[in-house]
Amino acid sequence: MKALVYYGPGKKSWEEQPKPAIKESTDALVRVLKTTICGTDLHIMKGDMPEVASGRILGHEGVGVIEEIGSSVSNFKKGDHVIISCVTSCGKCEYCKKGMYSHCEKGGWILGYMIDGTQAEYVRIPYADNSLYPIPAGSDEEALVMLSDILPTGFECGVLNGQVKPGDTIAIVGAGPVGMAALLTSQFYTPAEIIVIDQDDNRLAVAKTFGATHTINSAKENALIRVMELTDGKGVDTAIEAVGVPPTFELCEEIISAGGHIANIGVHGKSVTLHMEKLWDRNISITTRLVDTVTTPMLFKTVQSKRIEPKKLITHRFKLDQMIEAYDTFEHAAREKALKVLLEN
Ligand SMILES: [Zn+2]
Ligand SMILES: [Zn+2]
């Protein structure tokens, strides 16, 4: 089969690899139908995650069809269409029992990271019963690719942890796919104002069409001053950080109102200054989270009913064997006006 293989920072190849096989009775072998590239894959390619082994097949998002199941898989059978969750979970360990699948003792985020992933014709999924979600016939499978990672990530890490409530004023810092997912899902709770901050005018224009009430290009204007103007000097009730660099997190610290919530989503590679001298008496909370994907079934219903339309995040479509071209497009997202690239097998 063909797969996208990581060979150390900056080195990747679309090449022939052995087709994976069932190893454990709880595994499923899935033929990938649609997959995508995540910002996290670019982090790996940049060398930000040196723990990723050379020779690893990347990718942790996608939908597919079950090719084969291990003897103890009971929720799925050959031929079933499935959403592949970015998080693998056994469903039985202490963390899984708490609904904290991201820290499953036997799984968590391992796909396309510690084990071979979805940017391939086939992928082996451990603990298939708990790590795959069924797709009913006739569903729009392109939209469902967004349920592997970005929608639950934006919703759980940003909106739920940020405790977004009706009438709130919220800021989303970073209008990449995950920031956009937070933008879409925050509207379940009807916040009064949604301020989206980014440095890319195209992404901000898209954010407006997705429900942002105000946008700020922080490369052109002072985001702190603009947010304070928009909030009568109070700041926002929830600040969702969806970038993962020190300046954006520190901006969240500056724009948070008393009693507010800073919800981090970004993958941070560097330490951030926590301004306790300013925040100690502000009654704020700061949360971090790796997506647990516990809300995937709920989000699935909202996508099926078109209450939210994450398919609009797909800007580019490729055939699976155009993987290198798709990476090139996604790596130059601003130039290419790219949000999500979709690859079809
Ligand atoms: Zn991802
Ligand atoms: Zn577990």
Image (cartoon, helix red, strand yellow):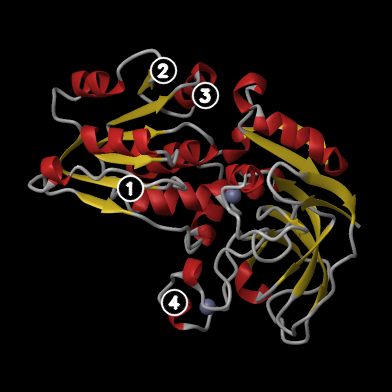
Disc 3: which residue: 203
Look at the numbered disc 1 and say if its residue's Cβ is closer than 8 Å to ligand 1.
no
- Quadrant where the N terminus sits is bottom right
- The x and y percentages for residue 66 are 80, 67
Look at the numbered disc 4 and say if its residue's Cβ is closer than 8 Å to ligand 2.
yes
Disc 4: which residue: 95
Q: Earlier in the sequence, mark 1 or mark 2?
A: 2
Q: Earlier in the sequence, mark 2 or mark 4?
A: 4
Kind of element beneath mark 4: helix
| Label 1 packing within 10 angstroms: few (<14), some (14-19), many (20+) | many
Q: CA distance from mark 2 to mark 3?
A: 13 Å
Q: CA distance from mark 4 to mark 1?
A: 21 Å
Q: Determine contact: label 2, label 3, CB under 8 Å.
A: no
User: Measuring 46% from the left and 47% from the top, which residue is drawn there?
Assistant: 269
Disc 1: which residue: 263
Q: CA distance from mark 2 to mark 4?
A: 41 Å
- The x and y percentages for residue 182 are 44, 41
Q: CA distance from mark 1 to mark 3?
A: 21 Å
Kind of element beneath mark 2: loop
Q: Mark on residue 219?
A: 2
User: Measuring 61% from the left and 65% from the top, which residue is drawn there?
Assistant: 110
Residue 106, by quadrant, is bottom right
In the image, is 56 to the left or to the right of 46?
right
Looking at the image, residue 146 lies above or below residue 83: above
Amino acid identity at mark 4:
Tyr
Q: Nearer the viewer, residue 294 or 37?
A: 37
Kind of element beneath mark 1: strand
Q: Nearer the viewer, mark 1 or mark 2?
A: 2
Q: Determine contact: label 4, label 1, CB under 8 Å.
A: no
Q: Nearer the viewer, mark 2 or mark 4?
A: 2
